[in-house]
Image: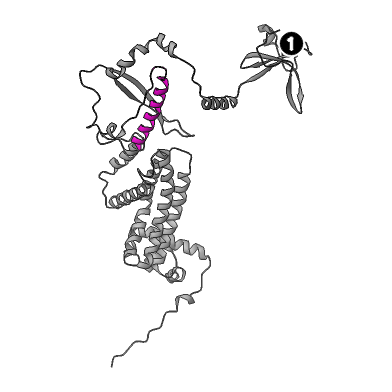
Amino acid sequence: MTNRQPVTPEPPVSSIPPPAGRDSVKTAFLDAAERLLVEVGYAQISTRRLADEAGANHGLIHYYFGSMEELFVQVLERFTERLLDRQRAMYARPVPFIEKWRTAWRYHEEDLAAGYPKVWLELQALAWNLPELRARVAHVNAEWRSVLTEAFSAALGEYGVDEATLPAEVAVALTMTFEHGAQVERLSGIDTGHAAIVAWIDRWLGGLGALPGDREEPSQIEAAMIMRLIDELLGAWSEAWAQVAQLTLAPNYETMFNSSMLRLVNPSDVVAVLGFEVRYEIGRTAESIGIPVSAPISFCIPHSSLEPILPRLSATSWYETAKEVDDPVGRQDLTASLQNVEVPVKAILGGVELSVDELASLKAGDVIRFGERANDPVRLSVMDQAMAWGVPGKVGDRVAIRLLTPLQHVMEA
Protein backbone atom coordinates (compact mmCIF):
# COMPACT_ATOMS: atom_id res chain seq x y z
CA MET A 1 0.00 0.00 0.00
CA THR A 2 1.44 3.35 -1.08
CA ASN A 3 1.59 6.15 1.45
CA ARG A 4 0.22 9.42 0.04
CA GLN A 5 1.26 12.83 1.28
CA PRO A 6 -1.71 15.04 2.01
CA VAL A 7 -2.10 17.81 -0.60
CA THR A 8 -3.53 21.12 0.38
CA PRO A 9 -5.69 22.28 -2.53
CA GLU A 10 -5.09 25.76 -3.96
CA PRO A 11 -8.03 28.10 -3.61
CA PRO A 12 -10.06 28.45 -6.79
CA VAL A 13 -9.12 31.37 -9.00
CA SER A 14 -12.46 33.06 -8.42
CA SER A 15 -11.83 33.18 -4.67
CA ILE A 16 -8.82 35.49 -5.03
CA PRO A 17 -10.02 38.96 -4.14
CA PRO A 18 -9.53 41.58 -6.82
CA PRO A 19 -6.74 43.98 -5.87
CA ALA A 20 -6.95 47.72 -5.90
CA GLY A 21 -6.31 49.28 -9.31
CA ARG A 22 -7.79 46.49 -11.41
CA ASP A 23 -7.25 48.34 -14.72
CA SER A 24 -3.66 49.19 -13.89
CA VAL A 25 -2.87 45.56 -13.07
CA LYS A 26 -4.50 44.33 -16.30
CA THR A 27 -2.54 46.92 -18.27
CA ALA A 28 0.66 45.82 -16.55
CA PHE A 29 0.04 42.20 -17.62
CA LEU A 30 -0.79 43.25 -21.20
CA ASP A 31 2.32 45.44 -21.42
CA ALA A 32 4.51 42.69 -19.99
CA ALA A 33 3.06 40.06 -22.35
CA GLU A 34 3.59 42.35 -25.32
CA ARG A 35 7.25 42.83 -24.41
CA LEU A 36 7.84 39.11 -23.85
CA LEU A 37 6.07 38.06 -27.06
CA VAL A 38 8.45 40.33 -28.96
CA GLU A 39 11.54 39.29 -27.01
CA VAL A 40 11.17 35.53 -26.47
CA GLY A 41 7.91 34.29 -28.03
CA TYR A 42 4.86 32.67 -26.43
CA ALA A 43 6.54 29.27 -25.96
CA GLN A 44 9.04 30.78 -23.49
CA ILE A 45 6.49 32.66 -21.39
CA SER A 46 5.37 31.00 -18.15
CA THR A 47 2.88 32.48 -15.74
CA ARG A 48 5.61 33.18 -13.20
CA ARG A 49 7.89 34.83 -15.76
CA LEU A 50 5.01 36.99 -16.96
CA ALA A 51 4.05 37.90 -13.38
CA ASP A 52 7.65 38.85 -12.58
CA GLU A 53 7.76 41.02 -15.72
CA ALA A 54 4.49 42.69 -14.76
CA GLY A 55 5.34 43.00 -11.07
CA ALA A 56 2.11 41.30 -9.99
CA ASN A 57 0.87 38.04 -8.43
CA HIS A 58 0.85 35.21 -10.99
CA GLY A 59 -2.56 34.01 -9.76
CA LEU A 60 -4.11 37.22 -11.07
CA ILE A 61 -3.42 36.19 -14.66
CA HIS A 62 -6.17 33.58 -14.61
CA TYR A 63 -8.37 35.80 -12.49
CA TYR A 64 -8.35 38.60 -15.05
CA PHE A 65 -7.90 36.71 -18.33
CA GLY A 66 -8.90 33.09 -17.74
CA SER A 67 -5.86 31.75 -19.57
CA MET A 68 -2.51 32.76 -20.95
CA GLU A 69 -3.86 32.31 -24.49
CA GLU A 70 -6.65 34.83 -23.86
CA LEU A 71 -4.10 37.28 -22.51
CA PHE A 72 -1.93 36.88 -25.63
CA VAL A 73 -4.81 37.42 -28.04
CA GLN A 74 -5.89 40.53 -26.14
CA VAL A 75 -2.33 41.84 -26.57
CA LEU A 76 -2.67 41.40 -30.32
CA GLU A 77 -6.12 43.03 -30.43
CA ARG A 78 -4.97 46.01 -28.37
CA PHE A 79 -1.82 46.48 -30.46
CA THR A 80 -3.86 46.22 -33.67
CA GLU A 81 -6.45 48.76 -32.53
CA ARG A 82 -3.73 51.38 -31.99
CA LEU A 83 -2.27 50.83 -35.45
CA LEU A 84 -5.64 50.75 -37.24
CA ASP A 85 -6.58 54.12 -35.72
CA ARG A 86 -3.32 55.47 -37.09
CA GLN A 87 -3.89 53.96 -40.54
CA ARG A 88 -7.45 55.29 -40.85
CA ALA A 89 -6.30 58.81 -39.98
CA MET A 90 -3.46 58.57 -42.51
CA TYR A 91 -5.66 57.32 -45.38
CA ALA A 92 -8.22 60.06 -44.65
CA ARG A 93 -5.70 62.83 -45.34
CA PRO A 94 -6.38 64.89 -48.51
CA VAL A 95 -3.11 64.02 -50.25
CA PRO A 96 -2.27 61.96 -53.37
CA PHE A 97 -2.38 58.20 -52.80
CA ILE A 98 1.32 57.81 -53.57
CA GLU A 99 2.07 59.90 -50.47
CA LYS A 100 -0.23 57.67 -48.41
CA TRP A 101 1.52 54.57 -49.77
CA ARG A 102 4.94 55.95 -48.84
CA THR A 103 3.70 56.82 -45.36
CA ALA A 104 2.17 53.35 -44.97
CA TRP A 105 5.46 51.71 -45.86
CA ARG A 106 7.29 53.95 -43.41
CA TYR A 107 4.81 52.76 -40.79
CA HIS A 108 5.62 49.18 -41.84
CA GLU A 109 9.26 49.77 -40.96
CA GLU A 110 8.34 51.43 -37.66
CA ASP A 111 6.02 48.55 -36.74
CA LEU A 112 8.76 46.03 -37.44
CA ALA A 113 11.01 47.89 -35.01
CA ALA A 114 8.20 48.05 -32.44
CA GLY A 115 7.55 44.29 -32.72
CA TYR A 116 3.98 44.23 -34.03
CA PRO A 117 4.64 41.68 -36.82
CA LYS A 118 6.35 39.42 -34.26
CA VAL A 119 3.29 39.54 -31.98
CA TRP A 120 0.93 38.83 -34.88
CA LEU A 121 3.00 35.92 -36.18
CA GLU A 122 3.37 34.46 -32.67
CA LEU A 123 -0.43 34.50 -32.27
CA GLN A 124 -0.96 32.97 -35.71
CA ALA A 125 1.37 30.12 -34.83
CA LEU A 126 -0.42 29.64 -31.51
CA ALA A 127 -3.83 29.63 -33.22
CA TRP A 128 -2.81 26.87 -35.65
CA ASN A 129 -3.32 24.35 -32.85
CA LEU A 130 -6.04 26.19 -30.95
CA PRO A 131 -9.19 26.53 -33.05
CA GLU A 132 -10.84 28.72 -30.41
CA LEU A 133 -8.20 31.40 -31.07
CA ARG A 134 -8.24 31.05 -34.85
CA ALA A 135 -11.38 33.15 -35.33
CA ARG A 136 -9.99 35.95 -33.16
CA VAL A 137 -6.75 36.10 -35.14
CA ALA A 138 -8.68 35.94 -38.41
CA HIS A 139 -10.76 38.90 -37.24
CA VAL A 140 -7.59 40.97 -36.87
CA ASN A 141 -6.73 40.11 -40.46
CA ALA A 142 -10.24 41.12 -41.56
CA GLU A 143 -9.92 44.49 -39.82
CA TRP A 144 -6.72 45.27 -41.74
CA ARG A 145 -8.31 44.06 -44.96
CA SER A 146 -11.31 46.36 -44.44
CA VAL A 147 -9.15 49.46 -43.95
CA LEU A 148 -7.06 48.69 -47.04
CA THR A 149 -10.08 47.87 -49.20
CA GLU A 150 -11.64 51.28 -48.55
CA ALA A 151 -8.33 53.09 -49.16
CA PHE A 152 -7.43 51.10 -52.30
CA SER A 153 -10.89 51.47 -53.84
CA ALA A 154 -10.52 55.24 -53.67
CA ALA A 155 -6.94 55.01 -54.99
CA LEU A 156 -7.91 52.96 -58.04
CA GLY A 157 -10.52 55.57 -58.86
CA GLU A 158 -7.90 58.30 -58.43
CA TYR A 159 -5.67 56.54 -60.98
CA GLY A 160 -8.51 55.78 -63.38
CA VAL A 161 -8.16 51.99 -63.06
CA ASP A 162 -11.53 50.27 -63.39
CA GLU A 163 -12.68 47.27 -61.34
CA ALA A 164 -12.40 44.92 -64.31
CA THR A 165 -8.73 45.77 -64.82
CA LEU A 166 -7.65 45.51 -61.19
CA PRO A 167 -10.29 44.71 -58.55
CA ALA A 168 -9.71 46.32 -55.16
CA GLU A 169 -9.95 42.87 -53.54
CA VAL A 170 -7.03 41.66 -55.66
CA ALA A 171 -4.93 44.78 -54.92
CA VAL A 172 -5.52 44.32 -51.18
CA ALA A 173 -4.73 40.59 -51.27
CA LEU A 174 -1.49 41.19 -53.18
CA THR A 175 -0.44 43.96 -50.80
CA MET A 176 -1.20 42.00 -47.63
CA THR A 177 0.48 38.86 -48.96
CA PHE A 178 3.59 40.80 -49.96
CA GLU A 179 3.72 42.68 -46.66
CA HIS A 180 3.19 39.49 -44.63
CA GLY A 181 5.91 37.68 -46.55
CA ALA A 182 8.26 40.62 -46.15
CA GLN A 183 7.67 40.61 -42.39
CA VAL A 184 8.42 36.88 -42.11
CA GLU A 185 11.66 37.27 -44.07
CA ARG A 186 12.76 40.38 -42.19
CA LEU A 187 12.25 38.61 -38.87
CA SER A 188 14.49 35.86 -40.26
CA GLY A 189 17.15 38.37 -41.27
CA ILE A 190 16.32 38.25 -44.98
CA ASP A 191 15.63 41.37 -47.03
CA THR A 192 16.73 40.32 -50.51
CA GLY A 193 14.61 42.02 -53.18
CA HIS A 194 12.45 44.00 -50.73
CA ALA A 195 13.85 47.42 -51.68
CA ALA A 196 13.45 46.58 -55.37
CA ILE A 197 9.78 45.65 -54.91
CA VAL A 198 9.06 48.85 -52.96
CA ALA A 199 10.77 50.87 -55.72
CA TRP A 200 8.74 49.09 -58.40
CA ILE A 201 5.50 49.87 -56.60
CA ASP A 202 6.51 53.51 -56.17
CA ARG A 203 7.24 53.73 -59.90
CA TRP A 204 3.97 51.89 -60.65
CA LEU A 205 2.12 54.60 -58.72
CA GLY A 206 3.82 57.35 -60.71
CA GLY A 207 6.76 58.05 -58.40
CA LEU A 208 10.50 58.11 -58.99
CA GLY A 209 11.40 54.82 -57.34
CA ALA A 210 14.83 53.61 -58.47
CA LEU A 211 14.36 50.46 -60.52
CA PRO A 212 16.87 47.63 -60.93
CA GLY A 213 16.67 47.96 -64.72
CA ASP A 214 14.71 49.43 -67.58
CA ARG A 215 11.19 48.08 -68.08
CA GLU A 216 9.71 47.86 -71.57
CA GLU A 217 6.06 47.53 -70.65
CA PRO A 218 4.17 50.12 -68.55
CA SER A 219 2.30 49.05 -65.44
CA GLN A 220 -1.51 48.99 -65.44
CA ILE A 221 -1.69 52.30 -63.61
CA GLU A 222 0.88 53.88 -65.93
CA ALA A 223 -1.02 52.55 -68.94
CA ALA A 224 -4.29 54.04 -67.63
CA MET A 225 -2.63 57.43 -67.15
CA ILE A 226 -1.05 57.28 -70.61
CA MET A 227 -4.38 56.40 -72.23
CA ARG A 228 -6.13 59.26 -70.46
CA LEU A 229 -3.43 61.70 -71.60
CA ILE A 230 -3.54 60.46 -75.19
CA ASP A 231 -7.34 60.64 -75.32
CA GLU A 232 -7.22 64.29 -74.20
CA LEU A 233 -4.42 65.14 -76.65
CA LEU A 234 -6.17 63.48 -79.59
CA GLY A 235 -9.42 65.25 -78.77
CA ALA A 236 -7.66 68.61 -78.69
CA TRP A 237 -5.81 67.73 -81.91
CA SER A 238 -9.03 66.85 -83.74
CA GLU A 239 -10.61 70.13 -82.61
CA ALA A 240 -7.59 72.19 -83.68
CA TRP A 241 -7.54 70.59 -87.16
CA ALA A 242 -11.31 70.81 -87.69
CA GLN A 243 -10.94 73.70 -90.17
CA VAL A 244 -8.44 71.73 -92.26
CA ALA A 245 -9.72 68.17 -92.15
CA GLN A 246 -12.10 66.01 -90.18
CA LEU A 247 -9.83 63.68 -88.26
CA THR A 248 -11.00 60.36 -86.89
CA LEU A 249 -8.35 59.29 -84.39
CA ALA A 250 -8.77 55.90 -82.75
CA PRO A 251 -5.58 54.71 -81.03
CA ASN A 252 -4.95 50.98 -80.79
CA TYR A 253 -3.71 50.71 -77.22
CA GLU A 254 -3.02 46.99 -77.45
CA THR A 255 -0.52 47.64 -80.24
CA MET A 256 0.74 50.84 -78.64
CA PHE A 257 1.86 49.06 -75.45
CA ASN A 258 3.38 46.11 -77.29
CA SER A 259 6.62 47.31 -78.81
CA SER A 260 7.17 44.03 -80.70
CA MET A 261 4.00 44.67 -82.76
CA LEU A 262 4.59 48.39 -83.32
CA ARG A 263 5.86 49.57 -86.69
CA LEU A 264 5.21 53.19 -87.52
CA VAL A 265 6.61 53.71 -91.03
CA ASN A 266 9.20 52.35 -93.38
CA PRO A 267 12.74 53.59 -92.71
CA SER A 268 12.82 55.46 -96.04
CA ASP A 269 9.51 57.34 -95.56
CA VAL A 270 9.34 61.08 -94.91
CA VAL A 271 7.56 61.92 -91.68
CA ALA A 272 6.58 64.96 -89.64
CA VAL A 273 7.37 64.67 -85.95
CA LEU A 274 5.48 66.88 -83.51
CA GLY A 275 7.27 67.12 -80.18
CA PHE A 276 5.67 68.09 -76.89
CA GLU A 277 6.94 68.40 -73.35
CA VAL A 278 4.64 67.15 -70.61
CA ARG A 279 5.21 68.82 -67.27
CA TYR A 280 3.73 67.68 -63.98
CA GLU A 281 4.50 67.51 -60.27
CA ILE A 282 4.83 64.53 -57.96
CA GLY A 283 3.89 64.63 -54.31
CA ARG A 284 2.29 68.09 -54.17
CA THR A 285 0.37 68.50 -50.90
CA ALA A 286 -1.12 71.34 -48.93
CA GLU A 287 2.03 71.37 -46.79
CA SER A 288 4.75 70.81 -49.39
CA ILE A 289 5.73 71.70 -52.92
CA GLY A 290 5.72 68.87 -55.44
CA ILE A 291 8.74 67.58 -57.35
CA PRO A 292 8.71 69.05 -60.87
CA VAL A 293 9.04 66.42 -63.56
CA SER A 294 8.96 66.75 -67.34
CA ALA A 295 8.99 64.16 -70.10
CA PRO A 296 8.90 64.35 -73.90
CA ILE A 297 6.10 62.93 -76.01
CA SER A 298 6.16 62.86 -79.81
CA PHE A 299 3.61 62.30 -82.57
CA CYS A 300 4.95 60.89 -85.82
CA ILE A 301 2.83 61.63 -88.92
CA PRO A 302 3.86 59.94 -92.20
CA HIS A 303 4.00 62.15 -95.30
CA SER A 304 1.53 59.84 -97.02
CA SER A 305 -1.07 60.77 -94.39
CA LEU A 306 -0.45 64.50 -94.74
CA GLU A 307 -0.22 64.62 -98.54
CA PRO A 308 -4.02 64.79 -99.24
CA ILE A 309 -4.43 67.87 -97.05
CA LEU A 310 -1.14 69.71 -97.73
CA PRO A 311 -2.83 72.31 -100.04
CA ARG A 312 -5.12 73.23 -97.14
CA LEU A 313 -2.28 73.96 -94.72
CA SER A 314 -1.56 77.49 -96.03
CA ALA A 315 -2.66 80.58 -94.11
CA THR A 316 -4.85 81.72 -97.04
CA SER A 317 -6.68 78.43 -97.13
CA TRP A 318 -7.10 78.48 -93.37
CA TYR A 319 -8.88 81.85 -93.33
CA GLU A 320 -10.93 81.03 -96.41
CA THR A 321 -12.30 77.85 -94.93
CA ALA A 322 -12.75 79.11 -91.39
CA LYS A 323 -16.40 79.53 -90.54
CA GLU A 324 -18.51 79.85 -87.48
CA VAL A 325 -19.85 76.57 -86.20
CA ASP A 326 -23.33 76.66 -84.75
CA ASP A 327 -23.06 74.80 -81.47
CA PRO A 328 -26.05 75.63 -79.22
CA VAL A 329 -24.90 73.33 -76.43
CA GLY A 330 -21.40 74.76 -76.47
CA ARG A 331 -22.79 78.30 -76.51
CA GLN A 332 -24.96 77.55 -73.49
CA ASP A 333 -22.03 76.04 -71.59
CA LEU A 334 -19.84 79.03 -72.44
CA THR A 335 -22.59 81.47 -71.39
CA ALA A 336 -23.10 79.66 -68.10
CA SER A 337 -19.36 79.69 -67.43
CA LEU A 338 -19.00 83.40 -68.25
CA GLN A 339 -21.91 84.32 -66.01
CA ASN A 340 -20.01 82.96 -63.00
CA VAL A 341 -16.78 84.83 -63.78
CA GLU A 342 -16.01 87.48 -61.16
CA VAL A 343 -14.61 90.82 -62.41
CA PRO A 344 -13.21 93.70 -60.32
CA VAL A 345 -15.45 96.77 -60.06
CA LYS A 346 -14.10 100.03 -58.62
CA ALA A 347 -15.67 103.40 -57.81
CA ILE A 348 -13.17 106.24 -58.13
CA LEU A 349 -14.14 108.94 -55.62
CA GLY A 350 -11.56 111.40 -56.83
CA GLY A 351 -7.93 112.13 -57.30
CA VAL A 352 -5.27 114.77 -56.74
CA GLU A 353 -1.61 115.20 -57.56
CA LEU A 354 0.81 115.89 -54.71
CA SER A 355 4.43 116.86 -54.83
CA VAL A 356 7.00 114.62 -53.18
CA ASP A 357 7.48 117.18 -50.39
CA GLU A 358 3.74 117.35 -49.75
CA LEU A 359 3.48 113.58 -49.74
CA ALA A 360 6.42 113.22 -47.36
CA SER A 361 4.97 115.78 -44.92
CA LEU A 362 1.60 114.02 -44.54
CA LYS A 363 0.67 112.91 -41.05
CA ALA A 364 -2.35 111.50 -39.24
CA GLY A 365 -5.19 114.00 -39.12
CA ASP A 366 -4.23 115.84 -42.34
CA VAL A 367 -6.98 116.35 -44.92
CA ILE A 368 -6.35 115.74 -48.62
CA ARG A 369 -8.62 117.81 -50.83
CA PHE A 370 -9.62 116.22 -54.14
CA GLY A 371 -10.37 118.21 -57.26
CA GLU A 372 -13.92 116.82 -57.48
CA ARG A 373 -16.85 118.48 -55.75
CA ALA A 374 -18.79 116.57 -53.09
CA ASN A 375 -21.90 116.32 -55.24
CA ASP A 376 -20.09 115.35 -58.45
CA PRO A 377 -20.87 111.84 -59.81
CA VAL A 378 -18.12 109.27 -59.44
CA ARG A 379 -16.73 107.05 -62.14
CA LEU A 380 -17.41 103.29 -62.01
CA SER A 381 -14.66 101.16 -63.58
CA VAL A 382 -14.91 97.51 -64.60
CA MET A 383 -11.53 95.84 -65.06
CA ASP A 384 -9.94 99.34 -65.10
CA GLN A 385 -12.24 100.48 -67.92
CA ALA A 386 -14.62 103.46 -67.25
CA MET A 387 -18.09 101.97 -67.72
CA ALA A 388 -20.63 104.18 -65.89
CA TRP A 389 -21.27 107.17 -63.63
CA GLY A 390 -22.95 106.96 -60.27
CA VAL A 391 -23.72 108.69 -56.99
CA PRO A 392 -22.13 107.38 -53.77
CA GLY A 393 -24.24 106.58 -50.74
CA LYS A 394 -24.95 103.87 -48.15
CA VAL A 395 -27.01 100.70 -47.96
CA GLY A 396 -27.15 99.63 -44.35
CA ASP A 397 -23.59 99.87 -43.06
CA ARG A 398 -22.00 99.42 -46.49
CA VAL A 399 -20.82 102.01 -49.01
CA ALA A 400 -22.84 101.80 -52.24
CA ILE A 401 -23.12 103.39 -55.70
CA ARG A 402 -26.40 104.29 -57.43
CA LEU A 403 -25.90 104.15 -61.19
CA LEU A 404 -26.76 107.23 -63.25
CA THR A 405 -25.94 105.66 -66.62
CA PRO A 406 -26.06 102.13 -68.07
CA LEU A 407 -22.90 100.05 -68.21
CA GLN A 408 -21.05 101.12 -71.33
CA HIS A 409 -17.78 102.77 -72.17
CA VAL A 410 -17.97 106.40 -71.04
CA MET A 411 -15.81 109.42 -71.59
CA GLU A 412 -14.00 110.59 -68.51
CA ALA A 413 -14.97 114.06 -67.28
| Nearer-the-camera pick, 70 or 222 | 222
- Identity of the residue furthest to the bottom in this view: 1
Q: Quadrant of residue 276?
A: top left
Measuring from the top left, give residue 277's x and y in whole percent: 36, 23
Measuring from the top left, give residue 209's x and y in whole percent: 32, 36
Determine the main secondary structure of the stretch shown in magenta.
helix
Residue 268 visible here: yes
Q: Is disc 1 placed on a helix, strand or loop? A: loop
| Nearer-the-camera pick, 337 or 152 | 337
Residue 38 visible here: no
- Residue drawn at x 43%, y 68% as measured from the top left: 61
- Residue drawn at x 44%, y 68% as measured from the top left: 65
**How many numbered marks have been drawn onto this rendered protein structure?**
1
Magenta stretch, residue numbers = 221-246
Q: Quadrant of residue 54?
A: bottom left
Position of residue 359 in the picture relative to residue 134 (left or right): right
Q: Quadrant of residue 118?
A: bottom left
Position of residue 268 in the picture relative to residue 2 (left or right): left
Residue 245 belongs to the span the image colors magenta: yes
